């Protein structure tokens, strides 16, 4: 749109130059002998210089003072009037002049100036050149004036539309930048939350187990029970190795363990059982499989199931004071289930950070976490197998 408006302005200047040269040529062809006896040539050159200087200055300044513009327009009009007084061939410069009046003057004043210019073009030649004047000499400039007015209003409408589109584009660009910044910030917060949950579910749980068992080692050594201490140290070594493996997987973009879900669950159960034995707080912990557990699950789902088992068992040994717990992993036609039941003292009802993070992780794959407590605790994770969304 801006290029079109620029083309129209250039076309106006070229039209003015063409009509000025055409008027001079027609005058010279009609009266070649009078060329040296009239001021036509100086007036033509003067009008061309004034017009070009004003146009160049406006282009370089951008928005010249209104007073200077009006003086320039008055000089152009007077020179054109003088040319019309000499020869009727310069009448058609009225067309670009009307466009200038409408563009450079206030609306009402521009219309008055356009009408006055038409009167000059229509009736001054009738007084000074009656032999060359006909009614068409008045009608033709009138049509040209009306056409110039119509073109100017079209130009103005295009200019306003271009300004509107430019404002809309600027607003859209600003909105896109704000949206991009907001999405970037949301992505950073989501990534922080995801990393926080991963660290809590892997490294933090492993280190917590090592700390607990190491305290048990100190107690065994203080009692002089070397065999128990050695057993506990081996438990610490196994837990440290598992934690190191988890940390390495975490560094490798938190990929899902390569082992199948039942195998990973069995390892979690064995580590938990061994840790509780090393702490002197044995837990009768078993793993049960139901349904088609050999079925390969989508990577996001298998990751959530394994993390859920680790978090739920960690809550059992930390808070339940249970003597027995059962983990049941089931794969059915339309969903995957994970149940963790214990005979402990029950669930207090307030979810800590780990359970809140687990609920968010399960929800990210379209599943739900349900916890019931009545003479023990039953935690159930249900994930539909139609979900393929990557957990956050």
Image (tube, rainbow, N blue to C red):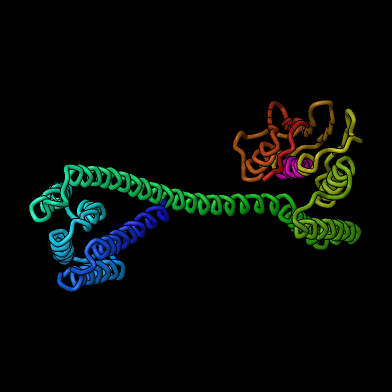
Give the extent of the magenta segment: 304-318
| Position of residue 194 measured from the top left corner of the image (x, y, whole percent) | 65, 50
| Depth order, front residue of 214/189 | 189
> In the image, is residue 307 part of the stretch drawn in magenta?
yes
Reply above or below: 292 against 16: above
Q: Position of 314 compared to 328: left or right? A: left
Which residue is located at x 70 percent, y 37 percent? 365
| Position of residue 64 measured from the top left corner of the image (x, y, whole percent) | 22, 66
Which residue is located at x 88 percent, y 33 percent? 288
Q: Position of 321 compared to 268: left or right? A: left
Reply above or below: 143 against 216: above
Predominant secondary structure in magenta?
helix
| Position of residue 371 measured from the top left corner of the image (x, y, whole percent) | 68, 31
> In the image, is residue 372 part of the stretch drawn in magenta?
no
Which image quarter: residue 211? bottom right
| Position of residue 186 measured from the top left corner of the image (x, y, whole percent) | 55, 50
Reply above or below: 242 against 330: below
């Amino acid at each position: 749109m801006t290029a079109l408006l620029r083309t129209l302005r250039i076309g106006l200047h070229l039209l003015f130059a063409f009509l000025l040269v055409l008027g001079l040529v027609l005058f010279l062809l009609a009266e070649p002998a009078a060329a040296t006896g009239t001021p036509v040539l100086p007036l033509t050159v003067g009008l061309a210089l004034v017009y070009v200087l004003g146009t160049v200055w406006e282009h370089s300044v951008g928005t010249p003072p209104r007073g200077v513009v009006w003086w320039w327009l008055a000089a152009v009009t007077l020179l054109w009037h003088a040319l019309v007084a000499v020869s009727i061939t310069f009448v058609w410069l009225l067309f670009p002049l009307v466009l200038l009046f409408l563009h450079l003057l206030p609306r009402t004043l521009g219309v008055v100036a356009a009408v006055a210019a038409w009167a000059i073009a229509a009736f001054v030649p009738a007084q000074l050149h009656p032999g060359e004047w006909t009614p068409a000499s008045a009608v033709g400039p009138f049509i040209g004036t009306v056409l110039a007015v119509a073109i100017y209003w079209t130009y103005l409408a295009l200019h306003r539309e271009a300004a509107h589109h430019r404002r809309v584009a600027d607003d859209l660009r600003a909105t896109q930048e704000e949206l991009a910044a907001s999405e970037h910030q949301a992505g950073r917060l989501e990534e922080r939350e995801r990393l926080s949950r991963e660290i809590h579910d892997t490294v933090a749980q492993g280190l917590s187990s090592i700390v607990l068992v190491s305290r048990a080692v100190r107690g065994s050594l203080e009692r002089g029970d070397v065999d128990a201490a050695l057993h506990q140290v081996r438990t610490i070594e196994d837990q440290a190795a598992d934690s190191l493996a988890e940390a390495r997987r975490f560094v490798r973009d938190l990929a899902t363990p390569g082992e199948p879900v039942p195998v990973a669950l069995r390892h979690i159960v064995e580590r938990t059982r061994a840790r509780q034995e090393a702490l002197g707080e044995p837990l009768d912990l078993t793993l049960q499989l139901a349904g088609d557990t050999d079925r390969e699950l989508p990577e996001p789902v298998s990751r959530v199931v394994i993390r859920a088992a680790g978090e739920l068992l960690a809550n059992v040994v930390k808070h339940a004071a249970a003597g027995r717990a059962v983990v049941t992993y089931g794969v059915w036609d339309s969903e995957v289930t994970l149940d963790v039941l214990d005979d402990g003292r029950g669930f207090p009802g307030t979810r800590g950070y780990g359970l809140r993070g687990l609920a968010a992780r399960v929800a990210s794959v379209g599943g739900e976490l349900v916890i019931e407590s009545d003479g023990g605790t039953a935690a159930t994770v249900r994930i539909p197998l139609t979900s393929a969304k990557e957990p956050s």
